[in-house]
Amino acid sequence: MASDMNDYFNKKKNESQRGGGFQAPKSPKIDFNMNSQKAGMLWLIGGFVLLLVLAKPFVIINEGERGILSTNGKYEAQALLPGLHFIIPLIQQVYVVDTKVRIINYADKIDRASTTGDGILVKPAITVLDKRGLPVSIELTVQYRLNAQLAAQTVSNWGFSWEDKIIDPVARDIVRNVVGQYEAENLPIMRNTIAQKIESGIRSNVGRQKNGPAELESVQLREIVLPQKVKEQIERVQVAKQEVERAQQEVERAKQEAFKKETEAQGVANALTIEAQAQAKANQLIANSITPGLLKLEQIKVQGKFNDALKENKDAKIFLTPGGSTPNIWVDMKSDHTQKVSSK
């Protein structure tokens, strides 16, 4: 049967060569002859590669991270530094923890989708009762990081949710203790003091934790959300204060204007006083300068003027004032014209 089939295909092959018709493709020749030792090596290498892919006996720690090595469920005391580390599959396992700065935002109105991400957590705002029992919401941002040198001990003591056991409860407790000391309407006024007390309290409390599991970077007090009635009361107080300040400014302006006028009046009075004193001093000097000889000389000068007048008008009559003082009066009898001559 086999020979008949071969003869059939050979016949078809000869016919196709003679007629230039269709030629069937030749099947490739594969040599399956391989010794057992070489085949075993290939299977061994393939199995080892497959084991590496599945077991992954190494781990790469990136910068800003630490590796917590667990051997049969027990954590090693020293964390793995950034780099390549080989482990024993199925016996050892590495848990990677973040040692970069992490953030917790305590807020109610923050968009969680846009603010959550690598190392950023969003939690509800901290609700606090003030000194009189009124509810107040505090929005806060806390920045912190895992202590890289003690990362393995921290995870061993607190677990991988260490920040929910250390940072979050401490922040809430400190905020309640600080804000509870004040009345709601005084919180905005004491904002800076409250922010300093909150940061100082959280930093001190976190620093007192055993083995220093976390390092606090900063605490920012973002918003103090007051009840609506308290807000309205604060607004009324602010308006009243503004009115009082405006009235005080008007009073101060009136005082300044009155003082200005008083100063100007005092200046005028002082000027008149100085002028009067100067005039009096001048009169005193003039009075002191008039001597009997000077008066006699002035009388002689006036008498000379009358003598000159008598030369031109011999009918004139001269009247001398008592005591010989000047001026003298002379009358022209011809023209009935009276003149008054004053000494200069």
Image (tube, rainbow, N blue to C red):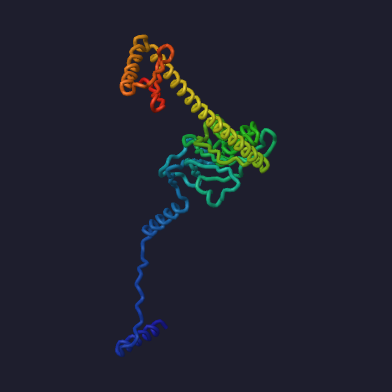
Is 162 situated above or below 207?
below
Residue at the limit of the structure toward the right, as seen here: 133
95 or 148: nearer the eye?
148
Q: Quadrant of residue 155?
A: top right
From this view, report whether residue 226 is shown above or below residue 312.
Answer: below
Residue 305 in picture, x, y percent from top left? 33, 20
Q: Dividing the image into 4 quarters, which one contains the C terminus?
A: top left
Q: In which quadrant of the rendered view does residue 281 lie?
A: top left
Quarter of the picture containing the N terminus is bottom left
Label total for image: 0
Query: Which residue is nearer to you in this view: 5 or 134?
Result: 134
Residue drawn at x 64%, y 39% as measured from the top left: 234
Residue 332 lies, in percent from the top left, at 38, 24
Task: Write down the quadrant of residue 201 in the picture.
Answer: top right
Residue 133: x and y in percent read 70, 36
Q: Is residue 95 above or below residue 175?
A: below
Front position in the image: 281 or 254? 281
Q: Nearer the viewer, residue 323 or 68?
A: 323
Residue most extreme to the bottom:
19
Residue at (45% x, 44% y) in the render: 87
| 73, above or below 333, in the image | below
Q: Position of residue 59 (x, y in %)?
A: 44, 46
